[in-house]
Amino acid sequence: MTAVAVTGIGAIAPNGQGTEEYWKSTVEGRSAINPITRFDASGYPSKLAGEVTFDAAAHLSSRLIPATDHVTRLSLAAADWALEDAAALPSELPDFSTGVITASSAGGFELGQRELENLWSKGPKYVSVYQSYAWFYAVNSGQISIRHGMRGPSGVVVSDQAGGLDAIAQSRRQIRKGTKLIISGGVDGSLCPWGWVAQMTDPRMSSSDDPDGAYLPFDARAAGHVAGEGGALLVMEDMESARERGARVYGEIAGYGATTDPKPGSGREPGLRRALTIALQDAEVSPDEVDVVFADAAAVPELDRIEVDAINAVFGAGRVPVTAPKTMTGRPAAGTAALDVAAALLAMRDGVIPPTVNVSRAPGYAIDLVTGEARSATVRTAVVLARGHGGFNSAVVVRAAR
């Protein structure tokens, strides 16, 4: 089976713009969860988020900026950085041999709000808000494709916070079918009044006003997550092609599993453990070969319990280090898991597991949670877990290149 390599990373997060800046902040445990500044959130129950303050003019042309919204600009920058990191030029590859497959979930609200304002001022015959919002799902991948002339397989996966892993898995399938190079992952978020109201329909959002105490997965004080924005885009290639061109290889996307939860009240086991087992089997990796798990980290006691039970059922209680660096950034919707994949690859490169900040593990959760500060460790194989609203479960195994 064709091995699929990651040769470039473009990370953009509240605690760092660019891969190395993000990673340095993450290893050092620097949180960027703060009161929202993008709009006046004083009248909303939730007032904290992980914001990305981005100077679009420094990265994009003056022609492109008015035609895009904030999240699309973040995506374009992340794609540029990933390709630069990979030293890859799509224009040098055969036509239709490169593509873009990303994930989206919360993005589009800013664009939609802009259209709502137009609708309010001009009347309904001028603007279709619903069409513009649905259309946004294709904007990010389409803009990246146009910018870099990538005319091969393209698409957008929508499975909420599991989407970043699902997009990476779809890209692996396409590369195994013969596509040379794909930009994949997810950059997402929605920090505008309309998007904020929509996100707060989810009762799993924290309403704490304390930046250090609002997002505490696996903690006795856990009371929901904090929203964020950003994510990561990866350059994925056929391993053999990457080696032939002398590319630096971060690692291999070795395994993937996805399930959906059973109907509530059915009494059946949630699907996360099975997704994890499928991913390990797909990678032909045994549980004792895994060096770290990047947890979904819902910060909802019931969901945290489900995740701990799944991890312990597969690896044994406290047998594998677990971390959730998203406690520093908040959860950027479909960008969440892609950012964790980037962190897993960087953990392999540098031999360090980033911490889960502000958390004191609850005694009832028998896991080896990395808290306080980063932990030095040899990381050859990592697992990233993600769950999306609606019962989506995904797991990806990332392995050092063989």
Image (cartoon, rainbow, N blue to C red):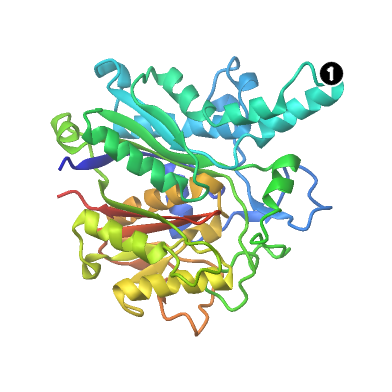
In the rendered image, the vertical position of residue 321 relative to residue 346, given as above or below: below
| Whether residue 315 can be seen here | yes
Is 223 left, or right, of 379 in this rendering? right
Residue 115 drawn above or below residue 105: above
Amino acid at pointer 1: Lys
Decide which of 251, 190 is in the foreground and name it. 190
Disc 1 target residue: 122
Residue 20 in view, yes or no: no
Which quadrant of the rendered structure holds the N terminus?
top left
The x, y position of residue 329, in whole percent, is 55, 54
Q: Position of residue 97 (x, y in %)?
A: 27, 22
Compare residues 258 and 83 and report the one nearer the observer: 258
The crowding category of the residue bearing disc 1, from other C-alpha atoms within 10 Å (few below 14, some 14 to 19, many at least 20), is few
Residue found at x 54% / y 34%: 74
In the figure, residue 184 lies in which quadrant? top left
Residue at the extreme bottom of the image, as rendered: 363
Estimate the x, y position of residue 212 in percent, counting from the top left.
63, 66
Q: Nearer the viewer, residue 13 or 253?
A: 253
Left or right? Give the position of 5 relative to 13: left
Q: Quadrant of residue 273?
A: bottom left
Relative image position of residue 168 (x, y in whole percent): 36, 42
Question: How many dots with numbers?
Answer: 1
Residue 182 to residue 385: above or below? above
Query: Which residue is drawn at the image coordinates 17% and 31% (left, top)?
Result: 241
* SS assignment at label 1: helix
